[in-house]
Image: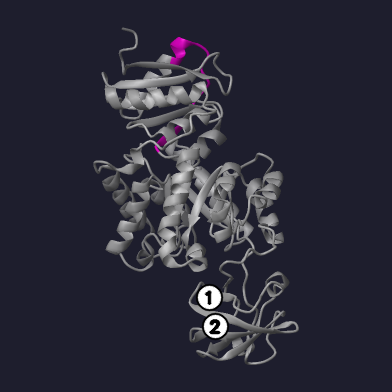
Amino acid sequence: MRERQCKIVATIGPASSAPSMLRFLHEAGVDVFRLNFSHGDHERMSMVMDSIRLVEKSVDRPIAVFADLQGPKIRTGVLDGDGIDLKYGETYRLRLAKEATAPDEIPVPHPEVMDVLQPGDILKLDDGKLQITVKDRDGDTVLAIADTPGRLTNRKGINLPGRQLPISALTQKDREDLAYALSIGVDYIALSFVQRPEDLEEARELIAGRAKIISKIEKPSAVDHLDRIVELSDALMVARGDLGVELPPEQVPGIQRRIVATCRKAGKPVIVATHMLESMVESIAPTRAEASDVSTAVYQGADAVMLSAETAVGRHPPTAVAIMDRIIKATEAEDGCQAFIIPTVDTDGLATADAITLSARRIAEVLDCRFAIAYTKTGSTARRLSRDRPRCGILAATPEMDVARELALQWGVTPVVTDDISHFHEMISKADALAEKFGGEKGERIIILAGYPFGRPGKTNTLKIGRIGGFEE
């Protein structure tokens, strides 16, 4: 059992796809694996998925996997000579085409982009490394001035800060990747470049309940619709890469705090991602700024922090995971860590189950309980407990493997697959056995949460307090 509450997500790539490395990463601290469908073919993804499930079986612990779809990434076309050296103040022509026909031309094979460009619009190229500003339109050609010098090469990303583009969140490639990801049994689907609540509708229809949805917040328009997107999603990701390109850098930390706080209030998991320990792609140790960045996300109460290139192509994947694990533990051990502070929740609409989990949180604090053990069919009781942040481990006992895997992303939750209970004596004895299995000692207090009649979802109405090995007294 992990000695921390915040979870670790690791991206799989060439540096980490071997079965032995996957096992090593899980033992080092990875709770959730990310399959990046922007890179790699379907056959490779299937092999990695099979390896993860073998690791899961060997360690006897549910592991969550999510497929990260590429989304409608806007890129330049092929440039004359495979590149162009932008000079400050010079004018360049943007044309709707896949390939350039002149040295001063930048092809943009996206009519939805070319149609909306107006004088004064700023385009950031190559993940924000270069910038041009639209000067004028001449028919189908857009004239733009280079604001920064530098070399632009083929198929680099284009960002339009402040523009909401009339494009779907799912491309044809995404639909094919989505169908394949579901066929190999991923637990979550991450949607890239969500702009508005309506972007989730098609994905939800295609997924049809076979996986949960993670909405990646990387566009200013998504921030504008944050509350509704949180409501319609199963989890969120603060994707700070494109968000940092679309917005001034000084705004990103505040938006991260807002997203984390909104998700915590709604009881939805939130992942903070991008460049967390970026220097460890090459270096054996992170910078102090990177360590502080991870610690800040943990302190704010993020359910998970994510490693991207660090584990996908980095030189030291297990070391990056181990260091992130240590940073999380150190942060959570601080007095006053805000991750344990319960978010302000609107009491209107709260149910009996909410009262039960809120009571469990307070009981765990007053009695210094070792575990809160939640019997859950759908995972809702464990999710409520995670939202309420008790100062004890949460054991989520469920008969459903898919539910257990989904709960692997939740803050503080250790999912366990076990047969459903049928009577009170079984509820008590099984909780006692689980507490001992996960390191509890005789005499330590535990809290048991369940629903009666047993086996019926959505009926959490029972709470019992006792000591490990002493329920018969």
Separation of residues labelled 2 and 1 (CA atoms): 7 Å
Residue indicated by mark 1: 126
Amino acid type, mark 1: Asp
Residue indicated by mark 2: 152
Q: Is residue 329 above or below residue 144?
A: above
Q: Is residue 228 above or below residue 123?
A: above
The magenta region covers 412-427
Q: Is residue 400 above or below residue 249?
A: above
Amino acid type, mark 2: Leu
Please give the name of the residue rendered at 37% of the width and 27% of the height, measured from the top-left corner: 361
Please give the name of the residue rendered at 52% of the width and 48% of the height, measured from the top-left corner: 236
Element carrying mark 2: strand
> On the rendered structure, is 354 left or right of 228?
left
Residue 40 can be seen in this image: yes
Q: Residue 451: say if magenta.
A: no
Q: Nearer the viewer, residue 468 or 139?
A: 139
In contact (CB < 8 Å): disc 2 and disc 1:
yes
User: Residue 165's x, y, as percent?
Assistant: 66, 64
Q: Earlier in the sequence, mark 2 or mark 1?
A: 1
User: Residue 30's x, y, as percent?
Assistant: 41, 48
